[in-house]
Amino acid sequence: MIKYAIFDLDGTLLDSSPMWQTLGARYLEFVGKTPREGIAEEMSEMTLPESARYLRRTYGILYSSEEIMRHITRMIEKYYTEEVRLKDGVPKLLAALHSYCVHMCVATASDERLGMKALTRLGVGDFFAGAVSCSDYGAKTSPDVFLAAADLIYALPEETMVFEDSLHAVKTAKSAGFAAAAVKDISESNQAALKNTADFYAENLGDFADNIKELLKFKVIA
């Protein structure tokens, strides 16, 4: 039986993938540079420091890497505090899980402080006990961030459903003994593999609410 839930943030709860895909281009336009084709793919796996060094070197930006990082951080903060919106179906699913006393938290690759601010602004922050970030526990190619999230809500993996939008994160969660529910997002190109790998799959999180009893009755097979 599922008693706990861990939610990814970007692409799962928040409709923020378009921002991350265009962040480099938006910054270049801010400093008067023209982004070349394919910049989103080039920067997709870079950390913030790597992105700053890449932009400075490739486009001849006169700011230091540290200044570029500060500029980009301010852009991200503004987006989360003022602009980002929830994905479709989020309030419906959270309310359904809450009605069954499912304890919830967030495991994100982004800044957990900004993430929680955004969720609170959008009216769903109170559903969550808190958040943990990959910046403290490593990328979701390792289960450490999911295990830390489980510790936050005193959950056992086999009693916990992880909600994600990326194939690699679903694989990692399942390898650590969690159940996994996947939702469609533009950030994941291999939707067929995501659907086949996850225990549950939906194009809209609200669809999970329509089948909440089936979701909560799921048993992880070791």
Image (tube, rainbow, N blue to C red):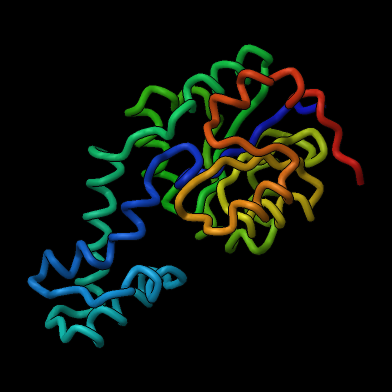
Of all residues shown, which one is farthest toward the right? 222
Residue 166 against residue 38 in the figure, above or below = above
Image spot of residue 132 (x, y percent): 54, 47
Q: In this view, does 103 lie to the left or right of 184?
A: right
Q: Residue pushed farthest top? A: 99
How many marks do you count on the picture?
Answer: 0
Q: Which of 134 and 208 is in front in this view?
A: 208
Residue 155 lies, with reference to residue 178, above or below; the image says: above
| Residue 92 vertical placement versus 22 (above, below) | above
For this orientation, the residue located farthest to the front is: 192
Identify whether 156 is placed above or below 95: below
Residue in the image at 47% along x and 37% along y: 13
Q: Position of residue 194 (x, y in %)?
A: 65, 51
Quarter holding the N terminus is: top right
Residue positioned 27% across, 49% down in the render:
77
Residue 189 point in image, percent of width and height:
53, 58
Q: Residue at x 30, y 81 (%)?
A: 53
Using residue 88 as the reference point, say whether residue 7 is left or right of it: right
Q: Residue furthest left?
A: 32
The residue lying at 44 percent from left, 24 percent from top is 124
In percent of width and height, residue 122 lies at 35, 27
